Image: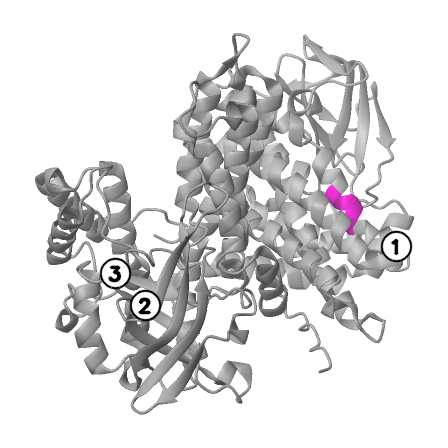
Amino acid sequence: MDLAYGPKYEAFRDEVRAFLAAHKDQAPRGGEQTMAGGRAWQKLLIEHGYAARTIPRAYGGYGAEPDILESRIIAEEFVAAGAPMGMANQGISMLVPTLLELGTEEQRKQWIGPTIRGEVIWCQGYSEPGSGSDLASLKTRASEDGDDFLINGQKIWTSTAHLADMIFCLVRTEPDAPKHQGISYLLFSMKTPGIEVRPLVTMTGAAEFNEVFFTDVRVPKSQIVGERGQGWQVANATLKHERGMLGDPNQAGSRLKALIELARTETVGGERLIDNPVWRDRLLKLQARVYAMEFHGLRLLTGRLKGEAPGLPGLIVKLMGCELNHQLAAFAIDALGELGVLYGESPHLRNHGNWQRNYMFDLGLIIGGGTAQIQKNIISERGLGMPREPKPAS
Amino acid sequence: MEFCLSNDQAMMQETIQRTLERVCPLERVRQAAASHETRAADVWAALTEIGVPGLIIPEEHGGVGLTLLDAALAAEALGRSVAPVPFAASAVMAPLALMGAGSPAQQAEWLPRLAAGEAVAGVAVAEHASGARDGAGVAAANGRLSGKALFALDAGAADVFVVADRAGGLHLVSADAPSLTRTALTSIDATRSIAELDFADTPAEPLAARDPAPVLRRMIDAGRLALAADILGAGQRMIEKAVDYAAERRQFGRVIGSFQAVKHLCAEMAAELEPCRALIWYAGYAFDEDAERASLMAAHAKAHLSEVGTFVARTATEVHGGMGFTDLLGLHYWFKRVGFDRQMLGGPERVRQDAAAFQGWA
């Protein structure tokens, strides 16, 4: 056990701090972020290696060797300084790694640079109304028409579709093939005729997602990533990157801090919540869980540094991390009593209504990105080696 | 940056586990339970040979000189095999009392014998760890103790007791002191021994430290961590048994492990228990390296493992169906081990009260 980073990394930390001290005033301020301001900050970060750090220089990145601890130090120092991190949208976190792994040289040259600079915004066209957990059953059809595909169908849960320039999209090109072998992964412009984007309002009251409808959308066949019919394998390379983003233990840590502060400051009939044994006990139960997940994260980090496969410990993070975040928000709502239901612009509102918003949105995260039930299938089958559900006779 | 076991630690734990698989299979546990052995001689001898009783005792006193994290790894292996031997009190708490508060003479008298497995030490600190029940309490005056201590740990085979008096002073009491009455308390867990100690002006040697409070604190922290690690090992074994059973047991024409209702129970157990391992590791590390948070982490480890262990114990039993409820399978030894660990040195609610106090919340 050695939780020190060592002199080499502490020197790197000093560099990051010096950068932040010198440039933090150029960062876009929360609330009034403009696209232009965000892009200028992103450009500065890429130049110094604090965004797109490991993307090769040939594609517009900084070109550093992957180093997990350096990435972690950058994140720690940006959070500590209250400076916005580099952009993290679906294009950057999911498409770019996929193109690096499976794209053609031409696709990498064309898309990676503009994507990491924030000049091209992407959305992800995976889920469909009839294909959620069973994503491979997707029906959006791409039929051949000369050198093009004609796309017809519907996608759902498409966040940022209303802002996106481009979409990376799963479509069925081989309707007669087994379901996992008839899918292709296409890239096309959201300005293409025949695309309609409708906002999808969720229980939080905001339209965090969209539905996207395709009617005879014409896409050149050359805009495929990987082989035709291999889109499922390409998408899995991408999903692997998405799972890593969900269930982040640092979020639970900062949320717990806010809960402790809430329990210290909110009073009921003159008694602070933290002085009430019932609330205190529930808060302590959550604190133990937050610590356990934080140290579990350190264990996984060490495994990654050693190049070990994450195995069962890695498979539980999405399930446990999302559930914990949800429980943390639930505590705040319960502890606030009637105040806990206030929302919108109400008088007496606490924390801008974010506890309720998080409580609802986190339920979405428990369902999205592989439901809790799908996670339990994965944990039991891949983590514990239990048998798969037998296929129904068809 | 390395948050994992060292190769030496992993090997040490595996050696203990292998040894126990050889000398302490379930049949041996059954025998020991039937004959009320809580220091099964052959198991104790095999563990002594590989240094387990003296794991944290300094080498100058014949021990191995390792850390509390190492002791937690040993406790995990013992819990895994529901080993009927002393450990939390005799190999962890009592050595810490002697090392932290004992005079050189007291250390020289007891530490080598404990390390060599020739003596067992019981520990009576329940009044401070979990609160006095049934009028328990020990008064000390002029080198003599009066009153009673409940739930002395590793008591059955003990040759000496470390006893905390009401004010937190620590004393050594010989198990054969004439005015000491030791009454075994029968518990659900036949693999461990607890006792009531009644003192009637019983001669006791005070442990020498001027301020015993920090030593008592360390003993309780370490004992809690040892019990928590015992739950980790027992829980891990119960999950493995449930998964194995579900792969064999057939109903409705298929193995029950292919039903999602059963798979999800197993996934929930694994998802709950896996982060506990990191919590135990950190609490062990904190005991030596993060003094400010050592007590808090030990408390969280104890409370959280107790909650998760209880969930795993009942759920693994359910996965075994009716067989889990029988004595034929013997799963109940693990169930009861977890139940015992949960209550000793403070149940979760009590331990969380301490965790609040450690942070200035209460």
**Which-is-in-front pick, marks 2 and 1?**
2
Chain under numbered label 1: B
Q: What residue type is labelled 3?
A: Ile
Residue bounds of the magenta highlight? B334-338
* Residue A231 spot, x, y in % from top left: 41, 79
Q: Which amino acid does label 1 sit on?
A: Gln
Question: Which residue: 88% across, 44% down?
Answer: B36
Q: Name the residue under label 1.
A: B31
Q: Mark 3 points at which residue?
A: A121
For the rendered model, the colour scheme is: one colour
Identify the mark at residue A167; answer none if there is no mark: 2
Q: How many marks?
A: 3
Question: Does the magenta portion include A356?
Answer: no
- Residue placed most toward the observer, B196 or A69: A69
| Prevalent SS, magenta region | helix
Chain under numbered label 3: A
Whether residue A321 sits left or right of residue B204 in the image: it is left
